[in-house]
Amino acid sequence: MRSWQRKTGPSLKGSNNPAWIPTAPAGANAGVGYGGAVECLDWSTAVIVAELKALGLDERTLVIFTSDNGARDDRGGSNAPLRGRKGTTWEGGQRVPCIMRWPGTIPMGTTCREVATAMDLLRTFARLGGTDAPSDRIVDGKDIRPLMCGESGATSPHDAFFYFRDGLEAVRSGPWKRHVRKGNQEMRGLYDLATDICETTNVADRHPSVVRDLEAKLAACRKDLGDSAVGMAGANCRPIGRVSNPAPLTRYDPNHPYIIAMYDLEDAG
């Protein structure tokens, strides 16, 4: 096990408590690989919560724990029972954990099963901060405060969720998920995620009306965002943002720990 302790050092603004730092750096003999990454995440999360308590802020602070999508199953992680791995548009490559804590605002011990995405955090945080997301452009995220706060009858603000991997590969609306492509291969799959979260049984032939509805949503998405798989440009795609005379904020330092993800050690640098 890696050991950690508090040492005297810079502390969070407004705090008289010393900073938390590790007693040993990440390395080959200190909890390597996937297990080491999980250990560090667990430790750093505990430190953040401890500092909030020390500052007297924990009872009025929204804390959200979430992650990147899909485990790489060759590195010790698992998406079971979901189908697929990181980099796919099966549910195993898309779903993420999300735990929220906000005493007095988010009900304790509750679970929300409605569709939400990380894109929703921008608009939600803006509203919580007393403002709104920009109104001069399309913002795909929605305000999910009703879901977070467990409001009675709150449902997902998303009529559909689209899955892209280079091209448009699938769409979900309610419990239904329609697959139309996997890489260079077309497919015609329909899955009921309410009863078949593992996406094992294609029921497209049994629900033609559902297929037609989802195909219409896919067509609308292609018009909006485009689809490279069918050579279609989107009407609302914006140019890539660019900065005049850009200068990097950081420079590569092989001895700095930020460059190392312990589950991707061979890719470091």
Image: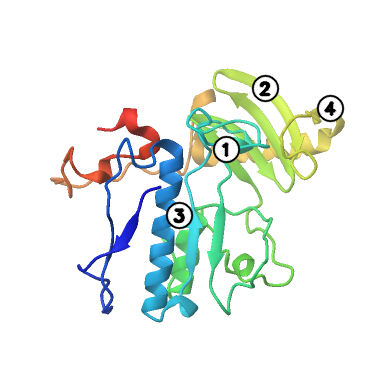
Q: Do the residues bearing badges 1 and 3 touch, measured as CB atoms within 8 Å?
A: no
Give the residue at mark 4.
205
Q: Quadrant of residue 28?
A: top left
Residue situated furthest top in the rendering: 185
Which of pointers 4 and 2 lies earlier in the amino acid sequence? 2
Distance CA(mark 1)–CA(mark 4): 22 Å
Q: Name the residue type under label 2.
A: Met
Distance CA(mark 2)–CA(mark 1): 14 Å
Give the residue at mark 1.
163
Which of pointers 1 and 3 lies earlier in the amino acid sequence? 3
Q: Position of residue 124 (x, y in %)?
A: 50, 65
- Secondary element under disc 4, as helix, strand or loop, is helix
- Coloration of the structure image: rainbow
Q: Position of residue 79 (x, y in %)?
A: 60, 37
Give the residue at mark 2.
187
Q: Which mark is residue 42?
A: 3
Q: Name the residue type under label 4.
A: Asp
Q: Do the residues bearing badges 4 and 3 touch, measured as CB atoms within 8 Å?
A: no
